[in-house]
Image (cartoon, grey):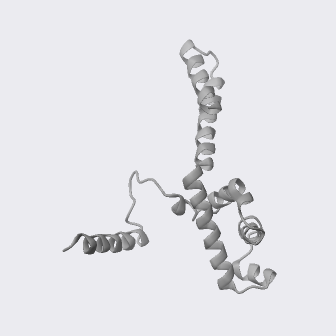
Amino acid sequence: MSNKMFDRAFRKCYYIAVRKGLAGLGSRIMTTKEKLKNPEYASMLYDFYGALLSESQKEVMSLYHEDNYSLSEIAEELSQTRQAVHYTLKKVEAALAEYEDKLGLVKSYEDNQRLAEKLVDIIKKDNLSDADRSAVTDIVRKITE
């Protein structure tokens, strides 16, 4: 079997495993496109990168992710077909995923949120030791980099 045929067969098997929920068990890191299936994540991407979209793209994203319109409702509102709205939505989500892959603003924001939570946990302790003070200082430096 050639490498090309093997790659094609592997991708097909992996695709089937993903559809059945068998792939990615364990410590697999999700890609931005996989995270887009989560509406909250898609909305966060829209919040960060929405200014880079055209007005019509913004309108579709806003109606779908913020106002919770269905594709049919958006199509009726914008006098488009449901398929056109679906295509626009997928195209916009792909663009947002590409922006995140290249710029990483949402990942940076999420990392800073985790560091801030650690900082709050340390501050809540009654007696801060020198080690805790040092840890707080290090976290603040990381957040402000």
Where does residue 65 sit, x and y in percent of width and height?
71, 66
Q: Residue at x 62, y 38 (%)?
A: 112
Q: Residue at x 60, y 23 (%)?
A: 136
Q: Residue at x 63, y 27 (%)?
A: 140
Of residue 79 and residue 136, the one placed in the foreground of this image is 79
Q: How many marks?
A: 0
Say which quarter of the image contains residue 101.
Answer: bottom right
Q: Residue furthest left?
A: 1
Placement of the C terminus among the 4 image quadrants:
top right
71 on left or right of 5: right
Say which quarter of the image contains residue 2.
Answer: bottom left
Where does residue 13 sit, x and y in percent of width and height?
32, 72
125 on left or right of 51: left
Q: Residue at x 67, y 55 (%)?
A: 44
Where does residue 70 sit, x and y in percent of width and height?
71, 77
Vertical order, 100 against 11 (above or below):
above
Where does residue 99 sit, x and y in percent of width and height?
60, 57
84 on left or right of 2: right
Of residue 121 and residue 92, the one placed in the foreground of this image is 92
Of residue 34 and residue 124, the one placed in the foreground of this image is 34
Vertical order, 100 against 72 (above or below):
above
Placement of the N terminus among the 4 image quadrants:
bottom left
